[in-house]
Image (spheres, rainbow, N blue to C red):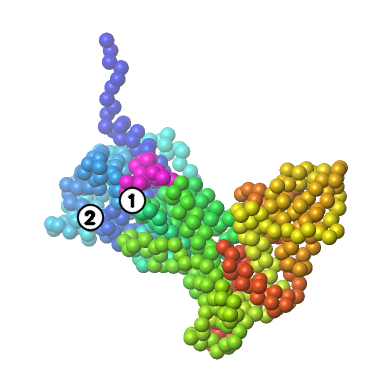
Amino acid sequence: MTRRIQVLPDAVANQIAAGEAVERPASVVKELVENALDAHATRVEVGVERGGKRRIRVSDDGGGMGREDCLLCLDRHATSKILEARDLSGVRTFGFRGEAMPSIAAVSRMTIESWDGEGEAGTRVTVDGGRINDVSDFARRRGTTIEVRNLFFNAPVRAKFLKSVSAETRAIHEVVMALALANPHVGFLLTSDDRTLLEVPAATDAATRVTQLWGPEQGATLIGALGAEDGLEVRGLIQRPDAAKPGVRRSYLFVNGRPFRASSLVRAVERGYRTTIPHGVRPWLFLYLRVPGDRVDVNVHPAKAEVRFRDPDQVEALVEAAVRRALDGESSSATFDLTPRGSVAPAAVRERDRGEPHGSAPRVAEAQMALFMTSTDTSGQSDVKPVELPDPGARRPRLWQALNTYVLAETRDGILIVDQHSAHERILFQRLMNGFETGGQDSQRLLFPLTLRLTAPEVSLIEDLGGLLSRAGFEVEGFGGDTVIVHATPNPHRYFDAERAFREMVHELTHGSELVRSARNQHERIAMTFACKSAIKAGQKLSDAEMQELFDQLFATELPHHDVHGRPTVVRLSSSELARKFGRS
């Protein structure tokens, strides 16, 4: 009987395997740069021609290889990264499969030049379609240079699926940027057809690396995010809500120093931003996770772009909480300063830092209010005692109203400008959300009930949401047809127009709006619309007591620096920025 199953020749098997590890020129760059990083390089130079289709050259100053290793690296499953299966748990290197080099060599013309510092000369190996053509001595400095030419020259079907030169160049640029962010302590150079696309020296931390890549203006919009729980840790940089814009988002995730993709974690970040940014806005994020090796699997796909967490829900919850805490702090507020104080936390995101995990960031009104000057002291000296809101005898920050819309407060190092309507929105939203959890907020019965004619869809909505509206403080009764009677309403302030607020709430809840679409459930929809329609309006003159109450209540909320629309409630202006504007710095 004729045997039908055949063992494929090595050349064919290598080309098939190359299809998994080598998808496009960017895949080659990724594998070669990762090898350089695993060799402890302090500088990596990448040069490409025609999007890497014609030529890719990666040079490093790492440990290098001797002659035997230069030859062994071309054998499938030959690696210096692991020795046995149990090493896969907690592997700390980028590579470990031993597949990349033979796969690349199988579909290109490759040259390897390397020296490990031992002996008088290095080694030069030339490979053509997986076949070694020549091995010779070669004088060079310590490190490795690998040149890949004519990628897929012997696999024309694969070559046809490559994209345009510009598209392939962009993909390579993204790969190098991700690895540069993952390894800020390494210098990188990327050139394309003799044009420099990226050049950054070694940096001390991720915050500096982001500034190197996108400039100080963008770097100044980032704030530190920290979180740790049960052996898991996240440290990173997220964008201030006022600086976030729609469109392209810079989104980079790293686990144990390895770049990876996870749409679920990006969604967790977005949940953390809930009620601080408008619908459709896409803030930048750079998150570095540290996870014990036995709780994350990086051996999911040959490209190693995906990982699997043992408890993904726990990781997502940690990320969401870290973002939420970061947005709770003063540094997340909008600012007039060109380089905001405390905008980034370099020490929080130093890659390969082996220090103890950070706990939860401090939070509560006292921490916020420690900034404020007191009304009885104008010296601005550092010995001024902080204001402590819970103490009824505490001295208060000096407040005054501008344009009947903004409340200004003098702080220890500048001025805070509070939008009274936005601030009151945040207060009312928080109060009603807390009320939903405790059974509802108080209402006030009307001496003369409101009789309102509404549209049929609005009446239907009131019937559907009757229980939630009641817990929000609105006691509503159907009166037949298109008419309802409102017997009781909340009383958030003495300027409150109950009929107008209720009509606008019901209209927005019925017909929808950007605000309503951004809410995650009916509780948030009602709380958001109530806050928006019931808050003190711009143009309303406030007494000193009302300003003080507004100020105190704002900084007792969970996210005091952002209203429910995603607009700032507070804008900071530091004394150093004032001095700079007046030429005093």
Q: Residue at x 50, y 74 (%)?
A: 341
Q: What is the C-alpha distance between the residues marked 2 and 1?
A: 30 Å
Would you identify the image quadrant in which residue 503 lies?
A: bottom right
Q: Residue at x 26, y 55 (%)?
A: 39
Q: Residue 336: x and y, percent?
A: 59, 74
In this orientation, does residue 562 appear?
yes
Q: Residue 63: x and y, percent?
A: 23, 57
Residue with the mark numbered 1: 292
- Taking the image as shown, residue 404 lies to the left or right of residue 375, namely right
Would you identify the image quadrant in which residue 141 lies?
A: bottom left
Q: Residue at x 78, y 56 (%)?
A: 488
Of 283 and 342, nearer the camera is: 342
Q: Which residues are magenta?
A: 293-312
Residue with the mark numbered 2: 64
Disc marking residue 5: none
Of 130 and 332, nearer the camera is: 332
